[in-house]
Image (tube, rainbow, N blue to C red):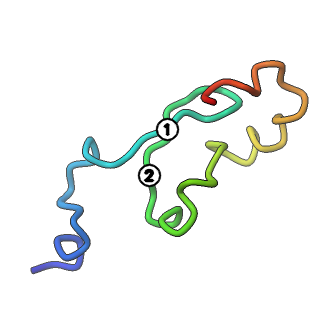
Amino acid sequence: MTRAEKLGFKGNKSTLPNKPCMVCAREMTWRKSWAKNWEEVKYCSEACRMKKSSNPQSGVGK
């Protein structure tokens, strides 16, 4: 049994959780680096994080 199988991920990314970016509304797929704070992840990139206060659509995804 591989490590990925032990964690429940078997290579099918369509089974991973998704959520929209609060700035651009692009779909973000769960990443292992976000495992501990997935609920707090709001932005798809550093660029969107910087635009958060200047974008009038910042309420998208709530």
Q: Residues within 10 Å of mark 1 (few under 14, many from 20)?
A: some
What's the residue at 90%, 28% (across, down)? Answer: 54
Q: Secondary structure at mark 2?
A: loop
When the figure is inspected, residue 47 is found, relative to residue 36, above or below; the finding is above
When the figure is inspected, residue 29 is found, relative to residue 20, above or below; the finding is below
User: Residue 11's image quarter?
Assistant: bottom left
Q: Which residue is mark 1?
A: 19
N-term mark: 1 or 2: 1
The picture places residue 59, in percent across and down from the top left corner, at 73, 26
Q: Residues within 10 Å of mark 2 (few under 14, many from 20)?
A: some
Q: Amino acid at mark 2?
A: Trp
Q: Which residue is mark 2?
A: 30
Q: Residue furthest left?
A: 1
What's the residue at 44%, 65% (across, down)? Answer: 32
What's the residue at 53%, 69% (across, down)? Answer: 36
User: Residue 31's image quarter?
Assistant: bottom left
Q: Are marks 1 and 2 in contact (CB under 8 Å)?
A: no
Q: For the C terminus, which image quadrant?
A: top right
When the figure is inspected, residue 38 is found, relative to residue 46, above or below; the finding is below
User: In 3D space, how far apart are the residues under numbered discs 1 and 2 (Cα atoms)?
Assistant: 8 Å
The picture places residue 48, in percent across and down from the top left corner, at 74, 38
User: Residue 49's image quarter?
Assistant: top right
For this view, does 62 lie left or right of residue 3?
Answer: right
The picture places residue 60, in percent across and down from the top left corner, at 66, 24
Q: Amino acid at mark 1?
A: Lys
What's the residue at 57%, 63% (across, down)? Answer: 37
